[in-house]
């Protein structure tokens, strides 16, 4: 059987699938990843992206943080691609138990997925550091201030996990539980190089681990099935039976 035929057979036989995804899931929606040749880490700014997207930088240079954030992190015109749509379809059919994502773009929810564990937060929540009021991403994008503020005067912070910040423990617990219970784990669009997120797949207890990535990962030798074609193109070929 071809890799896609094998994946189809395994999906047909499974009822607690978990999809663990990274930036490569959203590149087909026009959102650049961080580590590819034309990704954010290979572009030139006054500071490296890792510095700008750190808690310390946000606290000390919020105007410069927001200049980068609005230009490079808010892709509000992006639409879900075939991968997002197929995963939502699998969930509706009772096949997919959860999506665990390192992305902050909200495209899984836009496609219709309900149980999504966002390890690194989301651009769609922006929280006042003074009163806790929540604003959406459109408010941040369209705000004429260099640093957006709440009506109370407090500075807004995107509800994304910056460098130097810990992941949300409740989100981690939910993701770990889902992965532990999975009968099929599909990992897609991630180099599995970002920890602690990448370490979550170690909680998988099943025997079918699918890795979908254009380039090799450190976990390829552990995979039961490797698929190197684009994730959206691959998942679009999957037929969903209820």
Image (cartoon, rainbow, N blue to C red):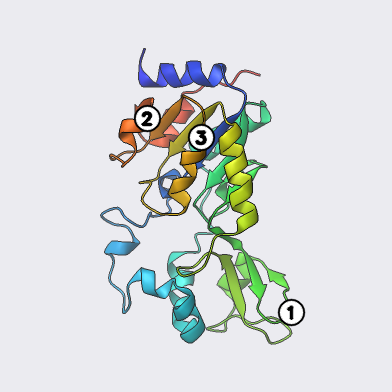
| Marking on residue 79 | none
Q: Which residue is mark 2?
A: 223
Residue at image x 53%, y 21%?
11
Q: Secondary structure at mark 3?
A: loop
Q: Quadrant of residue 113?
A: top right
How many residues crowd around disc 1 within 10 Å: few (fewer than 14), some, or many (20 or more)?
Answer: some
Q: Are marks 3 and 2 in contact (CB under 8 Å)?
A: no
Mark 1 or mark 2: name the one nearer the start of the chain.
1
* Spatial separation of the CA atoms under disc 1 and disc 3: 39 Å
Q: Going 50% across and 19% down the picture, which residue do you hit?
A: 10
The residue that disc 1 covers is: 131
**Mark 3 or mark 1, which is nearer the start of the sequence?**
1
Q: Is residue 89 visible?
A: no
Which residue is label 3 attached to? 204
Graded by Cα atoms within 10 Å as few (under 14), some (14 to 19) or many (20 or more), the crowding at tag 2 reads some
Q: Position of residue 18 (x, y in %)?
A: 56, 34
The front one of 227 and 192 is 192
Real-space CA distance between mark 1 and mark 2, rounded to the nearest whole angstrom:
47 Å
**Could you tell me residue 78's position as x and y percent?**
51, 52
The x, y position of residue 62, in whole percent, is: 50, 82
Is disc 1 placed on a helix, strand or loop? loop
Instruction: In the rendered view, tell whether residue 96 sits above or below residue 61.
Output: above
Looking at the image, residue 165 sits to the left or right of residue 216; the answer is right
Q: Nearer the viewer, mark 1 or mark 3?
A: 3
Of marks 3 and 2, which one's residue comes earlier in the chain?
3
- CA distance for labels 3 and 2: 12 Å
Looking at the picture, tell me which residue is in the foreground, 1 or 14: 14
Query: In the image as oriented, which residue stretches furthest toward the top?
Result: 1
Residues 82 and 19: in front is 19
Task: Tell me if 40 is positioned left or right of 18 in this view.
Answer: left
Judge whether residue 37 can be spotted in this image: yes
């Amino acid at each position: 059987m071809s890799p896609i035929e094998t994946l189809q057979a395994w999906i047909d036989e499974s009822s607690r699938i978990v999809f663990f995804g990274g930036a490569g899931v959203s590149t087909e929606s026009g959102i650049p990843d961080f580590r590819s040749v034309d990704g954010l880490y290979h572009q030139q700014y006054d500071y490296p992206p890792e510095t700008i997207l750190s808690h310390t930088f946000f606290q000390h240079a919020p105007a410069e943080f927001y200049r980068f954030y609005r230009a490079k992190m808010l892709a509000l015109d992006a639409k879900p691609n075939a991968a997002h749509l197929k995963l939502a379809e699998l969930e509706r059919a009772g096949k997919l138990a959860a999506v665990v994502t390192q992305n902050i773009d909200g495209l899984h929810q836009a496609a219709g997925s309900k149980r999504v564990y966002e390890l690194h937060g989301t651009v769609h929540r922006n929280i006042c550091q003074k009163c806790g009021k929540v604003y959406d991403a459109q408010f941040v994008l369209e705000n004429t201030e260099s640093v957006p503020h709440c009506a109370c005067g407090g500075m807004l912070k995107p509800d994304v996990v910056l460098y130097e910040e810990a992941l949300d423990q409740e989100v981690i617990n939910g993701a770990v539980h889902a992965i532990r219970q999975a009968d099929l784990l599909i990992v897609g669009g991630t180099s599995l190089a970002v920890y602690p997120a990448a370490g979550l797949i170690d909680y998988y207890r099943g025997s079918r681990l699918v890795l979908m990535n254009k380039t090799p990962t450190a976990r390829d030798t552990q995979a039961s099935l490797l698929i190197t074609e684009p994730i959206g193109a691959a998942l679009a070929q999957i037929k969903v039976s209820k």
